[in-house]
Image (cartoon, rainbow, N blue to C red):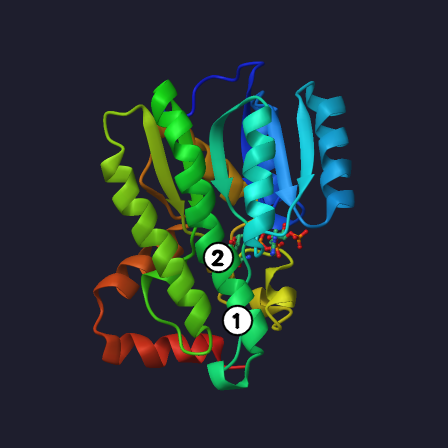
Amino acid sequence: MPLPKPSPNETVVITGASSGIGVELAKNLAERGYNLTLVARRIDRLEALASELKAAKGIEARAIATDLADATARVGLVAELEQGPAVVGLCNNAGFGIFGRLDRNDPEAELEMVEVNIVAVHDLTVRLLPGMVERGAGAVLNTASTAGFQPMPGLATYSASKAFVLTFSEALSADLSNTGVSCTALCPGPVRTEFSEVAGSAGLEDSMPSFTVVEASEVARQAVDGMLKGSRTVIPGIANRATAIGGRLAPRSLVLPIAARFTKR
Ligand SMILES: NC(=O)c1ccc[n+]([C@@H]2O[C@H](COP(=O)([O-])OP(=O)(O)OC[C@H]3O[C@@H](n4cnc5c(N)ncnc54)[C@H](OP(=O)(O)O)[C@@H]3O)[C@@H](O)[C@H]2O)c1
């Protein structure tokens, strides 16, 4: 089984565990008995969640404040993880989007998005994967998005960043066959979290067809099931699965104007 049964000397790392899908991943994994290492910048939230899950579920949970956009901070995080229990699960879930045309967006924020959504995912995976392969057990979960299945005008960098996560994870999933380690791309459609507010488009989910919106707890449940089964991709919601297939197969001349209608603000 890719994500092995919970063990006292092992931990599952979750980035972006201070909000939204990351919080629900933590709750779901704790419910199933896994010890956790929670990572994000807002340490107060991480510590509160760690305390809550320790008390309610009897697991070990620790919080590590890290700015994943900072390469030095990432090195520090990996060094700290290497001092602790073995990492059997890595949920690269932290990420954010920025709406708007590229020339009008803040260049620093755009660069930060590339660092968090792409470079940090690659960095943590490349540094933590060898230990899992050596032990012959483990699961990587990378949060991509249905935005990664096609280019999205108005979300150019974000959709490209999720296309990276998706392609990277799918290829890695095949590379890891017969190693005992899995890699799963989690591809949610719209989920009510802090995402739309951070992206400068508060209430975005309410403007999407309601049948595409899936609760964060359900996204997390399906994601953890995927880690346990070693699934290559998890796309919560039947409408989102259909959108993903359409995004992959339809000609760009059709996809680009449709996608632009959803991202126009
Ligand atoms: N919500 C959606 O509709 C949706 C759909 C598809 C995919 N996704 C993806 O799902 C993942 C989780 O997003 P969410 O919806 O749960 O949004 P969210 O509620 O805004 O959570 C984002 C998380 O990422 C962390 N993060 C952001 N920048 C960071 C940085 N520089 N260093 C460390 N952590 C950072 C945040 O923590 P701090 O601010 O405390 O650092 C927070 O915990 C993201 O990868 C997102 O792209 C979301």
Q: In this view, which residue lies farthest toward the top?
A: 8
Picture quarter with ligand 1? bottom right
Decide which of tag 1 and tag 2 comes sooner along the chain: 1
The residue under the point 51% across, 51% down is 214
Q: Position of residue 22 (x, y in %)?
A: 59, 44
On-image quarter of the N terminus:
top left
- Left or right: 210 with respect to 135? right
User: Which of the 4 quarters of the picture holds residue 10?
Assistant: top right
- Left or right: 24 with respect to 124? right
Residue 135 in view = yes
Name the residue that disc number 1 marks.
110
Amino acid carrying label 2: it is Asn
Q: For residue 186, which numbered disc appears in the image?
A: none
Q: Position of residue 146 (x, y in %)?
A: 39, 58
Q: Position of residue 66 (x, y in %)?
A: 64, 47
Label 2 beta carbon less than 8 Å to ligand 1: yes
Label 1 beta carbon less than 8 Å to ligand 1: no
Mark 2 Cα-neighbour bin, 10 Å: few <14, some 14–19, many ≥20? many
Q: CA distance from mark 1 to mark 2?
A: 10 Å
User: Which of the 4 quarters of the picture holds residue 181?
Assistant: top left
